[in-house]
Amino acid sequence: MNFRVGHGYDVHRYAAGRKLILGGVDIPFGKGLSGHSDADVVVHAIMDSLLGAAAMGDIGQHFPDTDEKYRGADSLKLLEHVADLLRLNGYEISNIDATIVAQAPKLRPYINAMRKNIAVAMKTDTSAVSVKATTEERLGFTGHLEGVAAHCVSLIYKANRE
């Protein structure tokens, strides 16, 4: 098997009047994230990680914010498309490991729902999806409640399909 590793990173600033969607979960909070789509920063990092591992560009190339059809898009639907695209090109997803960086809100109660949503979108088992959350101890833009960041590392492989 041909293993490939990808890394993804995304960041969105907080915005009033928007829902906070992380990992496809609508999290009660006083503000959401600014973006052309639903601004699901963790799913965006996952997509960039998977696309990077396959050397297939990034989400800006596949889902440009200049295209109105992606305005308000459900990022889990976009992730489903990315996973399908990888499979069409002979790749399978081994696992992903995502970290959300946010001072607030506390995300632990939502992690399992995020993992399940992401696994369903990628058509994989929940055991292949790790989502963690951390703060930056009130340092930097996430620590000052200006926004949320996410990192993701993924492992994919090209299976021999003989």
Image: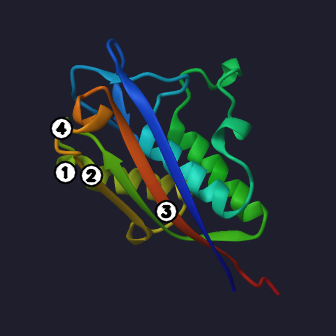
In the rendered structure, the answer to whether residue 23 lies left or right of residue 132 reads right
In this rendered view, identify the residue nearer to me: 140 or 27.
Answer: 140
Q: Position of residue 12 (x, y in %)?
A: 43, 30
Is residue 78 something that shows in the picture? Answer: yes
> Residue 126 bears which disc, if any?
none
* Residue type of the residue flagged with mark 4: Arg
Residue 51 as seen in the image, left or right of residue 15: right
Q: Residue at x 27, y 51 (%)?
A: 133
Tag 1 near tag 2, CB within 8 Å = yes
- In space, the residues marked 3 and 4 are separated at their CA atoms by 24 Å
Label 2 vs label 4: CA separation? 14 Å
Which residue has dot 1 on it? 108
- 14 on left or right of 6: left
Residue 105, compared with residue 46, is above or below; it is above
Q: Which mark is residue 138?
A: 4
What's the amino acid at mark 3?
Val
First along the sequence among labels 3 and 4: 4
Lower sequence index among marks 1 and 2: 1
